[in-house]
Image (cartoon, grey):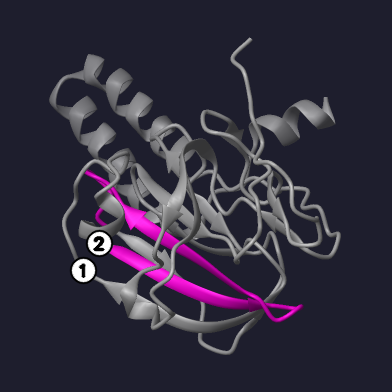
Amino acid sequence: MHNVLKTVLVPVHREGWPFIGIFFVVAILLCWLWSPLIVPGLFLTAWCVYFFRDPARVTPTREGLVISPADGVVQMIQAAEPPAELEMADEPHTRVSVFMNIFNVHVNRIPADGNITHLSYRPGKFLNASLDKASVDNERQSIRMKTTDGRNIVFVQIAGMVAHRILCTLTTGQAVRAGERFGMIRFGSRVDVYLPDGVVPQVCVGQQCIAGETVLADLTAGPADAAKGALR
């Protein structure tokens, strides 16, 4: 019974409570107008609670692992230059893009142990986050960190069509650990991770990721082929 309650009664991110309150008030007003409308009103309130859920995660703690910062599906793995505002060399890095739909947990987590070295917010468009050009044109929060072994990792929160609020609580110089919460994006979006030179992803396109748990790459591994997968 205790395990069942832990599964159902998931904590809610503090960003969600104002929205939950608004949805609940709307449900009461709908009921006042016409009592059967309480059903869709309460359904939408329950969905809002579900959207802002913030479950605990079990993060692998071995040195050198890069952990997924977002729940969702690996949509693209390709070479791309990190955002220009981070002032890095204009050289392509392997970029792993994790797309979040409205049913995924939207709390984002730190991908590796280290220190935050650069933060840059850029306003932009609200194109479909599944499009490749969303990484260039859409509103985004770009973050560069230096891992404990001195390598740079970049991760970028990208707004989608209905995601009009990117939350990032990090500060420059902050020491962070893999799996720690650092923000969220509301209502459908994407997070890109740019890996250091020579690091191969341990995930493949189409794979489902769990923020704070799924290993995207291993900085300590030697040269190897990128992961491959098959739908079965």
* Extreme residue toward the left, this view: 33
Q: Residue at x 16, y 20 (%)?
A: 34
**Residue for badge 2:** 139
Q: Quadrant of residue 204?
A: top right
Return the residue nearer the eye: 46 or 229.
229
- State yes or no: residue 152 in magenta: yes
Instruction: Label 1, secondary structure: give it.
Output: loop
Look at the image and tell me whether residue 169 can be seen: no
Q: In the figure, 18 relative to 85: above or below?
A: above
Q: Percent from the top left, x then y, of residue 14?
A: 49, 59
Q: Kindly report the secondary structure that dominates the magenta region of the rendered protein.
A: strand
| Neighbour tally class for label 2: few under 14, some 14-19, many 20 plus, Cα within 10 Å | many
Q: Amino acid at mark 2?
A: Glu
Quadrant that contains the N terminus: top right
**Residue for badge 1:** 123
Q: In the figure, 202 relative to 95: above or below?
A: above
Q: In the figure, 15 relative to 132: above or below?
A: below
Q: Residue at x 64, y 9 (%)?
A: 232
Return the residue nearer the eye: 174 or 2.
174
Instruction: Label 2, secondary structure: give it.
Output: loop
Q: Quadrant of residue 140?
A: bottom left
Return the residue nearer the eye: 150 or 6.
150
Q: Are marks 2 and 1 in contact (CB under 8 Å)?
A: yes
- Stretch in magenta: 140-164
Q: Percent from the top left, x then y, of residue 77?
A: 49, 43
